[in-house]
Image (cartoon, rainbow, N blue to C red):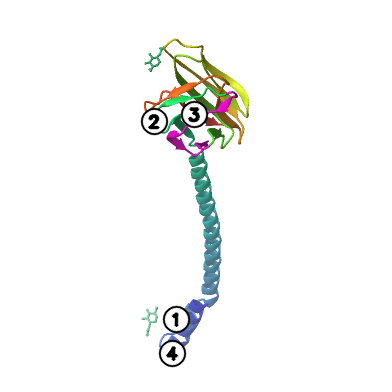
Amino acid sequence: MVVLQMILLLCAGSSVANDSCSTNVNIYAELEKLKNMEERIQNLEEMNEALKIIVQDSQNQLKSLQMENQAKKVAFSAGLLESGRGNTGPFHTGKTLVYKKVFSNIGGAYDSNTGIFTAPMKGAYYFRFYGHCHGGPTMAISLLKNGETQCSLHSFKPASNGNASNGVVLTLETGDKISTRLWQNTWVYDDPASYTSFGGFLLFPM
Ligand SMILES: *[C@@H]1O[C@H](CO)[C@@H](O)[C@H](O)[C@H]1NC(C)=O
Ligand SMILES: *[C@@H]1O[C@H](CO)[C@@H](O)[C@H](O)[C@H]1NC(C)=O
């Protein structure tokens, strides 16, 4: 609109000195051109709005993908004793082993206060546990999923000392709980060399 007014003023001002405005310039054709231009600008503005939305959507998608990728990083490893040395057990009942020396806990799914790993998402997970004991009582530990035995290790009344380990791939739902349990009347040993440990990681989400 401002452009149009300027042209009209220009024509009015120059009509005396130069009659090109009043005679040679087809004002209707010029107006038509302006109208076309305005339409094109409007189209461009609409396209620009659409592009803005696409860019915003892409940014949101990227952000959620980054967050998803971050959430997929789940891995932990812990030794039984944080410091010192000694036997754990034997006890009259089974006991959840609480591994205190946390080597890594990416994603924070392992709780070193309870010894329990809680699956943050559905997926295939790998767990392994290792036990060492001195000669004497039997050492026996099971890996439990929501309280149910999945696999175990066992060293029957070793003469001098014993070692045993096991590992398993489990398909877990979000919130499934994995822990290890020392059997009743058995024991396990640990010291700063961390002979007895528990660890696991997400292989892939499902
Ligand atoms: C009038 O306009 C024409 C075309 O733009 C130009 O060639 C001519 O020099 C102008 N005459 C005057 C007097 O300004
Ligand atoms: C158990 O493992 C420890 C540490 O690796 C080793 O010194 C010991 O000899 C092993 N015990 C047996 C009975 O193999």
Depth check, front residue: 91 or 72 = 91
Quadrant placement of the C terminus: top right
Q: Which residue is mark 1?
A: 20
Distance in Å between CA atoms under marks 1 and 3: 87 Å
| Element type at mark 2 | loop
> Upstream in the sequence, badge 1 or badge 3?
1
Earlier along the polypeptide chain: callout 3 or callout 4?
A: 4
Residue 84 is marked as 2
Which is more N-terminal, label 2 or label 3?
A: 2
* Mark 1–mark 4 distance (CA, rounded to whole Å): 10 Å
**First along the sequence among labels 4 and 2:** 4
Cβ–Cβ below 8 Å for labels 1 and 2?
no
Mark 4: is the Cβ under 8 angstroms from ligand 1? no
Label 2: how many Cα within 10 Å (few below 14, some 14–19, many 20+): few
Q: CA distance from mark 4 to mark 2?
A: 107 Å
Of callouts 1 and 2, the N-terminal one: 1
Local packing at callout 1 (Cα closer than 10 Å; few below 14, some 14-19, many 20+) is: few
Residue 111 lies, in percent from the top left, at 52, 37
Label 1 near ligand 1 (CB < 8 Å): yes
Give 188 or 33, whichever is nearer the viewer. Answer: 188
Report the residue marked by disc 3: 200
Residue name at image x 51 percent, y 25 percent: 127
Q: Amino acid at mark 2?
A: Gly
Residue under label 4, please give it.
16
Which residue sits at x=48%, y=44%?
A: 66
Span shown in magenta = 92-113
Tell me the kind of residue under disc 4.
Answer: Val
Give the side of residue 87 with respect to residue 174, left or right.
left
Q: Give the CA distance from mark 3 to mark 2.
A: 24 Å
